[in-house]
Image (cartoon, rainbow, N blue to C red):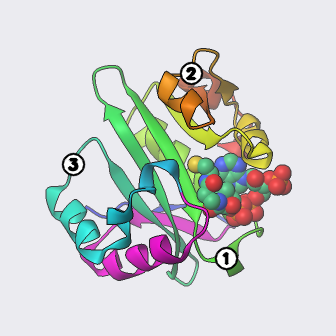
Amino acid sequence: MITVQDHSGFSVRLRKVLPADADILSHWLRTSSETLPTLAHTSFQISSTWRNIFLSDRSDQIYLIVLKESHRPIGLSVIYRVDRQSRTAFGGLAIFEQAERKLGRGFEAKRLQLRYAFGDLNLGIVYSRVKSSNESIIRGLKKFGYQTQFQPTREALAAEHTILSLERGMWAKLPEDLR
Ligand SMILES: CC(C)(COP(=O)(O)OP(=O)(O)OC[C@H]1O[C@@H](n2cnc3c(N)ncnc32)[C@H](O)[C@@H]1OP(=O)(O)O)[C@@H](O)C(=O)NCCC(=O)NCCS
């Protein structure tokens, strides 16, 4: 199933990753200096990994391509460690095309990711794992109501990551322009 979400008046959409995206995804991960912690493994730099991800269709990992209005791929939304029992998951987002950054698209794509996570997936909490030094991302997440987790895992501390969480109730109370 292809998921397309649209936000009237703005220019990003999300749709499910297809085998035809394997080359651009591996290219992004080979050439990007900043990536998502969950995509740090070198296997993501190889096209066949992405084709296998598509074929395996794992329900605990959901990869959605970020498209701009022209339908050109510019980034990736990853919802991972999806736990249907506890209704929790982690969400990460990257705008890999450098020329498309700083235009508000990352923020809009995050809104769509959260709508998908709380709406379509019916999650109760969405976590985010970010480099502790990345203050602008942490500030950005706090605009969406994310709060710092005060008991991060040892794994996160060792990697100098901060874990933030957003509860469904907090998200639901956000003003219209953030949801
Ligand atoms: C983070 C990223 C997606 C932002 O993309 P962008 O299109 O340049 O962002 P925008 O133009 O929408 O940014 C507007 C503001 O919202 C924040 N923001 C945007 N997208 C965000 C996101 N997904 N999460 C948190 N904050 C975000 C930005 O930090 C920025 O804040 P600032 O004005 O204080 O600097 C992009 O820089 C990127 O891909 N970085 C590498 C991957 C990464 O670190 N992802 C976040 C951790 S999961």
Judge by depth and name the residue closer to the eye, 176 or 58: 58
Residue 91 locus on image (x, y percent): 49, 43
> Is-magenta flag for residue 31?
yes
- Of the 4 image quadrants, the one containing the N terminus is bottom left
- Of the 4 image quadrants, the one containing the C terminus is top right
Task: Choose top left, top right, bottom left or bottom right for residue 81.
Answer: top left
> Is-magenta flag for residue 107?
no
Q: Is residue 39 visible?
A: yes
Residue 61 locus on image (x, y percent): 32, 47
Task: Choose top left, top right, bottom left or bottom right for residue 98.
Answer: bottom right
Residue under pointer 1: 98
Label 2, residues with CA under 10 Å away: few <14, some 14-19, many ≥20? some
Residue under pointer 2: 152
Residue 165 locus on image (x, y percent): 58, 27
Residue 49 locus on image (x, y percent): 25, 67
Quick check: 151 above or below 17?
A: above
Q: Is residue 107 visible?
A: no
Residue sitting at 51 percent across and 82 percent down? 72
Quick check: 86 above or below 166?
A: above
* Kind of residue sitting beneath label 2: Pro
Judge by depth and name the residue closer to the eye, 150 or 42: 42
Q: Which residues are magenta?
A: 10-35
Quick check: 10 above or below 121?
A: below
* Kind of residue sitting beneath label 1: Gln
Residue under pointer 3: 58
Residue sitting at 23 percent across and 61 percent down? 53
- Quarter of the displayed picture in which ligand 1 can be seen: bottom right
Judge by depth and name the residue closer to the eye, 45 or 149: 45
